[in-house]
Amino acid sequence: MLHDSWPFNKTLIGLLFFLIQSFLFFTPPSAFSKREHLVYFPNTAYELNVYRIYGKRPGKTLMLIGGIQGNEPGGFLSADLYADMSLEKGNLIVVPRANFYSILLNKRGPHGDMNRKFTHEDATDSMEDKIVSILKKLIGQSDYLLNLHDGSGYYYHEFIDKWRNPRRFGQSIIADCKAYIVPETKKPINLGEIARKVIAVVNPHIQNELYKFHFNNTRTADSDSSHKEQRKSATFYALTKHHIPAFGIETSKFLPSINLKVRYHNLVINAFMNLFDIVPEHPGIALEPPVLKYLVLSVNGQAATVVKDEHTIYLRAGDSIHVSHIEANYERGLSLDILGYGDLNDFRKDLVIFRDTSLIARKDNQKFAEIPIIISKSSGIEGSERVRPKRVQSLIIKACGHRILLSDGETLDLVKGEHMKIVGIIPSFLSR
Ligand SMILES: [Zn+2]
C-alpha cells in the first residue's frame, strides 16, 4: 500500500515545491523603488492623477491627498513633490490634485465641497462623486491618510482674537478625536498622541511663534461638536470605515509666501513619514527606459514642426535641417545624431542633407528613437499610418457679405477692390 501511494506523494511534493518556487519568483525582494501612475478622466477638467510609489523594502502605506479644495495651493503643490519621490522602505499613494476642476477655477468647491462627500455609501451622480469613490478605494488600501489643506487664520485652543481662535484652521494638525476605539478590536488609535509627536518634531524648525503648529481636535462625532460637518470628510471616513489614523494638515492661507506653505506641509509630511517608518531614498533612483515624446524640427529655417518616433522625414537634396528641441522623459544626457552628417551630437546644428539617412536620439549612449530621413521631390513629415492631407478640396471664403464654399477647379468672381478672406480649408485625405 505504501508503494502505491508514492506517485501521489511525489506529485504532492512536486506541487509544493512548485508553489514555493512560484511564491519566491513572484515576490522577490525588489532591488529598486517602483512606481505606478494612473490617470482617470484624462484630458478633462476633472483629470485625476494617482501615483503609487513602492519602496525597496516592504512597509506601511501612507496616502496623501492634495487639492481637494481648489483654492488651497500649499497642499497640492507640496503633494506634487511626493509624487516623484523614491522610497527605501514603505509605500506612498499620492493624489496631488483630487479636485482639478476646483483648482482650475481657484475655488473651494464649485459644485459643493468635495471634502463633504465621503459618506459610507457611494454616490455616482456627479464627477465629484465618481472621484470620491476612487479616493475611498485608495483610502481602503492605505494604512494612514493625510489630507492637505490651507486654512484661514491660525488655530489656537483659546480665543485670542478674530484670526487666532478655536474656529480657525491655519497651522494645525486636525484629528476627529483624541483617541478612536476600533469597534471590533477595542484597541485605541491614539490620534492626539501621534499629532503631538509630529508637532514636537516640526515646531523647532519654525522660528515665528505665530506659525507654530497646534493639535486641533474637532471632536467630530461628539453631540456637542462644533464641527459636525466633518462627519462627511475624508479623514472621518478613513477613521470610521477603515480604522486607519487620518489627519487634516492645515497651513495658513495668511502665510506670506506660497513657498512657506509648501515648506510647512513638507515638514509635517516628513515627520509623519518618519514616525510611520516610511523611508525616502536620497537621491531617488528612478531609471526608467528613455522615451521620445517628440522633436521640434525646422527645414530651411522655416516654421518648426513636431516630429514623432513613428514619423518619416522627407527632404529635397540640399535641404537644411535643424532640431531645436528634444522632448523626452529625461532632460539630461540627451543628444541627437544625424548619421553620416555633422558629428556625434548634431542637436541645434544646421546640417545640409543630400542622401537618405536617419536621425538618432540618444540618452547617454542608449539609442531610444530612430527617424528615417528620405530624399524625395518634396519635403514634409509623414506619419507611419501614411495618411495626410494631400491637397485642398475646398475653401470657405468670406466675400460679398457671404460665406462661399469654393471647390477645387471652381472660379470666384469678384469686383475689383472687393475684400475677400479665406476662413477655412477643407482638405481631402488621401491614403497612399
Ligand atoms: Zn481645506
Image (cartoon, rainbow, N blue to C red):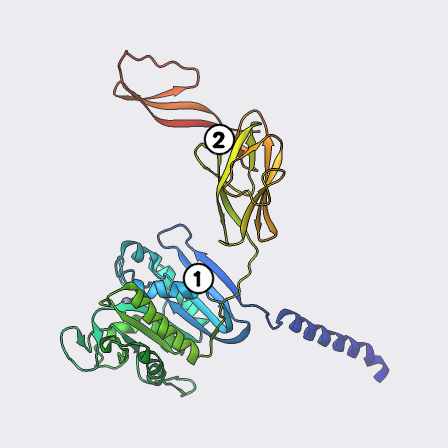
Instruction: Check the image and report above or below for 258 versus 341.
Output: below
Query: Residue 260 location, x and y as percent?
Result: 30, 67
Look at the numbered disc 2 and give the secondary structure of its residue: loop
**Where ligand 1 lies, by image quadrant?**
bottom left
**In the figure, is residue 226 to the left or right of 189?**
left
The location of residue 378, given as percent across then percent down, is 54, 26
Sort mark 2 into few (<14), some (14-19) or many (20+) by Cα contacts within 10 Å. Answer: some
Looking at the image, which is closer to me, 164 or 315? 315
Q: Is residue 185 above or below residue 331?
A: below
The residue identified by callout 1 is 50
Name of the residue lying farthest toward the front = 343
Mark 1 and mark 2: Cα distance apart in space: 43 Å
Q: Position of residue 344 (x, y in %)?
A: 60, 45
The answer to whether the residues at label 1 and label 2 have Cβ atoms under 8 Å apart is no
Instruction: Look at mark 2 in the image and give the residue it sits on.
Output: 300
Q: Residue at x 62, y 72 (%)?
A: 28
- Figure quadrant of the C terminus: top right
Three-letter amino acid code at disc 2? Asn
* Tag 1 secondary structure: strand
Which of the two discs, 1 and 2, labels the residue nearer the N terminus? 1
Q: Is residue 156 visible?
A: yes
Quarter of the N terminus within the rendering: bottom right
Q: Residue at x 68, y 75 (%)?
A: 20
| Image quarter of residue 271 | bottom left
What mark, if any, has residue 345 been given in the picture? none
- Residue 377, by quadrant, is top right
Query: Callout 1, which amino acid?
Result: Val
Name the foreground residue: 337 vs 369.
337
